[in-house]
Image: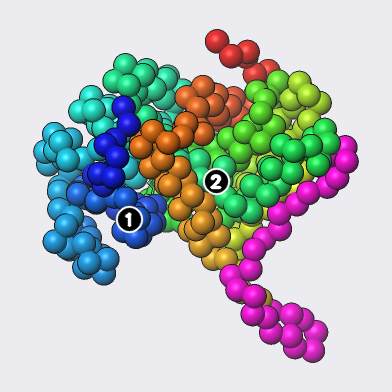
Amino acid sequence: MATQKNTPIGIAIFGLGRIGKVHLHNLASAFRVNIKWIVDDISVHDDIRTLLQKYRLEHVTRVASLEEADTVHSDTSVTAVFVCSPTCHHELTIKKALTAGKHVFCEKPVAGSADVIKSCYAMAKKTNRTLFCGFNKRFDPDFDVIYRKKQNGDLGKVRQLIMISRDPPIPMSYIRGSGGIFHDYCIHQLDYVCYFLGERPLTVVAYGNTNSLKADDYRDCNDVDLSTIILTFRSGAIAIIETSREITYGFDQRLEVLGSKALAMCENIPLSAGKMMVASETIQNVCPDNFVRFARSYVVEVNNFLDVVEGKTECLVKPHECIMVSELAHLCEESLRTGQVVKVPPQE
Ligand SMILES: NC(=O)c1ccc[n+]([C@@H]2O[C@H](COP(=O)([O-])OP(=O)(O)OC[C@H]3O[C@@H](n4cnc5c(N)ncnc54)[C@H](O)[C@@H]3O)[C@@H](O)[C@H]2O)c1
């Protein structure tokens, strides 16, 4: 299953939108890979070629249309496929890539339903290939400081975990095809709190509303732009997840963990250390979005995936965890619809 020692890992990237560009940027400077292909709609090929020139990859990387995807899957010099297309297209690409013997890095979520995610992991098992889900917050070095404090006992018993995630506007075209706030967005936080606590929740309750400046657009999509999720755990810990789309003051990502021995927190990280102090206020630039705030996490997660492909380490994100968080997102939808606290069924 591992690649040959010292042979660069041949990569194909499917989808070069917002997150695909982040991975291209990081892979372009990774010494152990060759980016063989980028697959995307023909309408964006000129932009892709301009980007390839920027990274001096124009003679190395070929650009394929969606219709040429099978050519890419059958290229034996491709060892790993990055799936960065909209979520509704993941399943087909994952299954074709696995069947062709490729390892797969797939952006979160693997798919919009737990059943489809199960079938993708079943295929990964059958083909003996890695399917790695890009839950990048697990790889964030700043959150990881707190995780390691918890792991070595410095926090004591975790009593409460609060995760706040508020994002600036993203195009409504993305929201429309996203699968809804719980499967598309809260899935990051659901994954992180369960990973942090190392537990499956007992109950979940979710509240949500459309009250941003684009509330009508969200209502048209049958979605909400704000949610609060509360999860309880057998250990006694309670997790509170606050998410909001469409915020107007930058990008807001915070984590707070109350332990029996200590309180740990990760505040918002400024864009730079530079500040301006005037008579009544101090002004400092904030990170504008995910891609800047979590830039290091994307590098760490991709290196982790490449290590897995090279047989150097185990995949940190386990199949049962991806399936569980998809089920939790589904239970959040049920709770929002019914107004009830929902019991989380035990793992099958
Ligand atoms: N981990 C993160 O922080 C993070 C952030 C953003 C998005 N995502 C995930 O990444 C995925 C893509 O999101 P995005 O915001 O980059 O979307 P996007 O709309 O910006 O880009 C998607 C790209 O995929 C292309 N595409 C469409 N169908 C395709 C197919 N069948 N094969 C190949 N390419 C195809 C589109 O033309 C477009 O260029 C989603 O699953 C999303 O949930 C993850």
Q: Quadrant of residue 306?
A: top left
Question: How many neighbours does mark 1 have within 10 angstroms: few (below 14), some (14-19), or many (20 or more)?
Answer: few
For the residue marked with disc 2, what is the amino acid?
Phe
Q: Position of residue 214 (x, y in %)?
A: 53, 56
Q: Is residue 271 magenta?
A: yes
Q: Nearer the viewer, residue 50 or 230?
A: 50
Most frequent secondary structure within the magenta stretch = strand
Q: Residue at x 47, y 31 (%)?
A: 314
- Please identify the quadrant where the C terminus is shown: top right
CB-based contact (under 8 Å), mark 2 and mark 1 = no
Q: Position of residue 71 (x, y in %)?
A: 11, 38
- Please identify the quadrant where the N terminus is shown: top left
Q: How is the image coloured?
A: rainbow
* Left or right: where 243 falls relative to 278: left
Q: Quadrant of residue 250?
A: bottom right
Q: Nearer the viewer, residue 111 or 292?
A: 292
The part of the chain drawn in magenta is 258-283
Please tell me whether mark 2 sits on a helix, a strand or a loop: helix
For the residue marked with disc 1, what is the amino acid?
Phe
Q: Residue at x 65, y 49 (%)?
A: 143
> Which residue matches tag 2?
139
Q: Position of residue 237 (x, y in %)?
A: 78, 30
Of all residues shown, which one is farthest toward the top? Answer: 348
Q: Quadrant of residue 231?
A: top right
> Which residue matches tag 1?
31
Distance between mark 2 and mark 1 Cα atoms: 20 Å
Q: Position of residue 151 (x, y in %)?
A: 71, 37
Q: Nearer the viewer, residue 180 or 338?
A: 180
Question: How many neighbours does mark 2 have within 10 angstroms: few (below 14), some (14-19), or many (20 or more)?
Answer: many
